[in-house]
Amino acid sequence: MRLGPRVATIVVNYRHHNDTVRCLNSLQASTDVDQQLIVVDNTEPEFARADLADLLDPAVRTISAGGNIGFAAGCNLGINAALTTHAEFVWLVNPDAVVDPSTLSHLLATADEHPDAGVIGCRILDDGKPPRILFNGGVIEGKGSTLHADAGKFDHDVADSSVREVDYVTGACLLVRRHVIRQIGLIPEEYFLYYEETDFCLHAQRAGWRTIMAPHTRIWHYKRSTGKLPTPYYIYYMCRNRVHFSQRFFSAAFDEIEAELSPFIEGWGRRIAIHAPHLTGSFEKLVQIALADGRDGRLGRRDDISDFTFI
């Protein structure tokens, strides 16, 4: 006999309350309602335009982080609350996502069919008509290069009928067993943003758990971070954290990591050269800082990244 809900669903809000309300509405429309909804608010007090709790159903538990403590730390606040409910699973969902009503049911059915799977993910689509795939399983190549399977393909063109083992699952939609968290611990917070869920999946695999994709699952991700130019925090944390991740799991030398990062850096550099050539110097300086911090083992939040403006 269970003492609480089977699933504790965690959404980490950051500034955009309307996104989170839309996400929660879709979660509450799930065909499987055996879930406790938990929202962690990472919004800084100076950017809070409303009390998030006032916008949500009273049944939703809200937790204030007191500010932007990072994605993993926000998730961990929710996970610690979830563990007190004795939930069998924790489900992480991005606030800018809309969930198909049947997704949770399919995730749980897949977990039941594969008890050795500790982390289960779903197909993530954009909001196009027809939608294209953003994520259909994570692949790790070389010394830590990551890519999303089937990215850019139309959803209806890619078969979806069987469980697949993958290298990692993105934190935009990640179902994890309570036993995995009890065994390996919480999501690593030192990354602050990006690569933390990849680290978590590999850690779980080293502990003997499989990472799989569940068929017939869909969420739509209304990403705010897309555009012609990258945000400074995206460039900084992606480069710095890639160094940390590759050294941790692949014992990669810095020159190997830098070589594998070159296509990422050069690709964004070309975009900036085309759309904002006067900011090329700032971009190159930011990359140098990120790589140096990665090499020196500097982790966590770095506040001065907001000083770089090339968006």
Image: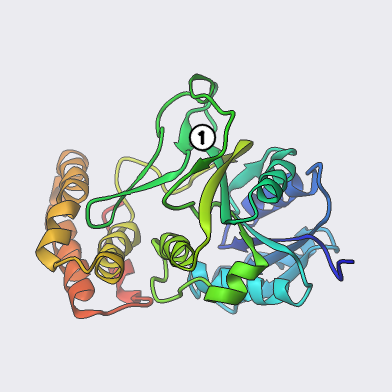
Residue 171: horizontal and vertical position, in percent? 52, 56
Q: Is residue 186 left or right of residue 230?
A: right
Residue 311: horizontal and vertical position, in percent? 31, 51
- Position of residue 143 relative to residue 186, above or below, is above
Q: Is residue 135 left or right of residue 60?
A: left
Q: Is residue 224 left or right of residue 33?
A: left
**Residue under the image location 23 percent in, 57 percent down:** 143
Query: Which quarter of the picture shows residue 221?
Result: top right
Q: As rendered, which of 91 and 264 lies closer to the eye?
A: 91
The image shows a total of numbered marks equal to 1
**Residue under the image location 75 percent in, 47 percent down:** 25
- Position of residue 248 relative to residue 150, above or below, is below
Identify residue for label 1: 126
Query: Which quarter of the picture shows residue 29?
Result: top right
- Position of residue 115 relative to residue 12, above or below, is above
Q: Amino acid at mark 1?
A: Asp
Residue most toward the right? 1
- Residue 75, visible in the rendered structure: yes
